[in-house]
Amino acid sequence: MAVAALRRGGIIAYATESCFGLGCDPRNRRAVSRLLRLKQRAASKGLILIAADPQQLAPYVADFPRKALASWPGPHTWLLQPTVTVPPWIRGRHPRVAVRVTRHTQAAALCHAAGMALVSTSANRAGERPARSYRQVLHRFGSALDYVLPGRIGDLKAPTPITDAITGQVVRAA
């Protein structure tokens, strides 16, 4: 049902390493716009993409540095050089694209089943704490979502760190 919702251009919620995430097809501009409105998030901030393996990120990433590949699958998000075809609504105002190959079993299985990378942003509205359970997602978003996949979040207490692979700058610490 989650994959069917994604293919219809829907927004889903699912468990990730530290919280529930909201996701959609990154190439579907309408779905991404709807997700941003739902979160009350500025498009200029950009979005993270998650995948089950680096192959799913190939349409978005021009080059995979060895240090990124060595950290995956795992809870590390990298800012990498985008391909020329990355939709602007994914990068926002940033010159690079934020990507992660997830080790979270259910999130990886979702990417495998969908056959693609997914937008992955915390299940919260701007300024709120991320939802950490299925019930919290339902309480906060209810029928505004097309599907909520029951599941358990991983062991991380904070969002994954984000590092710029080109400059080495840590943009978000663990």
Image (cartoon, grey):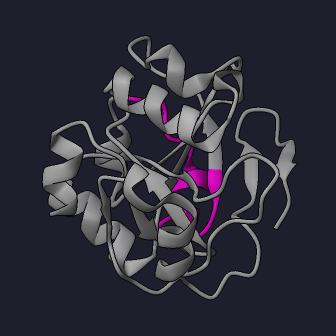
| 7 drawn magenta | no
Q: Main secondary structure of the magenta part?
A: loop
**Quadrant (top left, top right, bottom left, bottom right) of the C terminus:** bottom right
Q: Is residue 164 visible?
A: yes
Residue furthest to the top: 84
Residue sitting at x 20%, y 50%: 5
Locate residue 93: give its quadrant: top right
Q: Does residue 156 lie above or below 44 as drawn?
A: below
Quadrant of residue 128 in the image? bottom right
Q: Is residue 144 left or right of residue 120?
A: left
User: Residue at (58%, 52%) from the top-left corner?
Assistant: 68
Query: Eyeballing the image, is 127 above or below 46?
Result: below
Q: Percent from the top left, x then y, of residue 152?
A: 46, 87
- Where residue 91 appears, x then y in whole percent? 59, 24
Query: Quick check: is 74 in the magenta stretch?
Result: yes
Q: Is residue 157 left or right of residue 52?
A: right
Q: Nearer the viewer, residue 113 or 143?
A: 143
The residue lying toward the viewer, choosing from 158 and 33, is 33
At a point 82% along the width and 51% down the height, the residue shown is 127
Q: Position of residue 45 (x, y in %)?
A: 71, 29
**Residue 153, percent from left and from top:** 53, 82
Q: Which residue occupies the foreground of this view, 18 or 139?
A: 139
The one nearer the camera, 93 or 84, is 93
**Which residues, given as a range, are shown in magenta?**
60-77
